[in-house]
Image (cartoon, grey):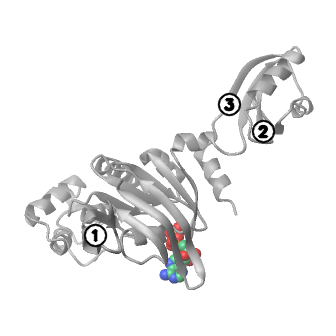
Amino acid sequence: MSIEVKNLFKYYGSQAAVKDVSFNVGNGEIVGFLGPNGAGKSTTMKIITGYINASGGSVKVCGKDVTVDTLDTRRLIGYLPENNPLYLDMYVKEYLTFVGKIYRVPNLKERVKEMIQKVGLEIEQNKKIGQLSKGYRQRVGLAQAIIHDPEVLILDEPTSGLDPNQLADIRNLIKSIGKEKTVMLSTHIMQEVEAICDRVVIINRGEIVADDTAKDLQLEGSVQTVFVEFEGSISRNQLKKIPGVGRVEQMGEGWLLESSEDMDLRKSVAQFAQQNDLLAVTLRKEEKSLEEVFKQLTKS
Ligand code: ADP
């Protein structure tokens, strides 16, 4: 296991920012850490990287406790903090060399060259960081995070503030880096998880509210929806009388029926059709969008 977080707590004064958080990230996984602003994502990530201490609980990275094997775990982790703090007056190569020296990276000159190639910084490599666009600054941030060849990458909101082209480039870069490393990235954008991650851990108000693959999350939840189309006309009131049906919404030629409890409505709709001598030409379970699942899980 690459990351093991167990019963983690963090208090800022009397405010509990992280409450009994536990989850694991397996080797080679790309996991999305999703939650609204203020949910506790950065706090959790700072504890994993050893930047701040927890108030309770434990974190292991590749089997090592981050509060005991501090130096070892720092070598195992590459970290891109929120807002990517960089030295704007430094040149790209100068900065990467500076970071590499801190980690005592061998053959540093070669390694810096390799990193510049890996993150696609060739054409901007002779500029000062302050002269770079936000997208290229993120590339520098990613290069500094992987220069010491860590096993685990922790990326805090790596795509925030990027334009759509930069966003696509950085997502692709993370995906390609993720082929060789374990990655945990935080975001408040659902599509990001769908685009990059194998699994999603959702945090809300300091507590984990979901830990699943994106696909399985869509199938869970207390409300299920079916789409049905009948041959011939039918009224909303008739549909409302079907056992288990809650909300009814017309959609084109058909109807969206929401269950009032956690049940698959297809059976009762099929029975209803049979009893009323109606032909259901379409009857299918609708997958909820991840956006809806997220909203449902994190509403206050
Ligand atoms: P997220 O990254 O999900 O936006 P954070 O981990 O930054 O959430 O914040 C979680 C909660 O902890 C928020 O209510 C925030 O205001 C609070 N918090 C974060 N850092 C500090 C700090 N250094 N001092 C006091 N409160 C903090």
Which residue type carries mark 2?
A: Ser
From the viewer's perspective, is residue 265 above or below residue 9?
above
Label 2 environment density (alpha carbons within 10 Å; few <14, some 14–19, many ≥20): many
Distance of label 2 from label 1 (alpha carbons): 49 Å
Closer mark to the observer between disc 3 and disc 1: 1
Of the pair 238 and 13, the residue shown nearer to us: 13
The residue tagged 3 is 285
Question: From the Cβ of disc 2, is ligand 1 less than 8 Å away?
Answer: no
Which residue type carries mark 3?
A: Lys
Q: Is mark 3 on a helix, strand or loop?
A: strand
Please report contact status of discs 3 and 1: CB closer than 8 Å, yes or no.
no
- Where is residue 264? Give x, y as percent: 73, 32
The residue tagged 1 is 74
Label 3 environment density (alpha carbons within 10 Å; few <14, some 14–19, many ≥20): some
N-terminal of the pair, mark 3 or mark 1, is 1
Tell me if I can see residue 160 in this picture: no
Which residue type carries mark 1?
A: Arg
Of the pair 232 and 278, the residue shown nearer to us: 278
Distance of label 3 from label 1 (alpha carbons): 47 Å
Instruction: Say left or right for 61 vs 229.
Output: left
Q: Is mark 1 on a helix, strand or loop?
A: helix
Q: In which quarter of the image is residue 16?
A: bottom right
Of the pair 241 and 23, the residue shown nearer to us: 23
N-terminal of the pair, mark 2 or mark 3, is 2
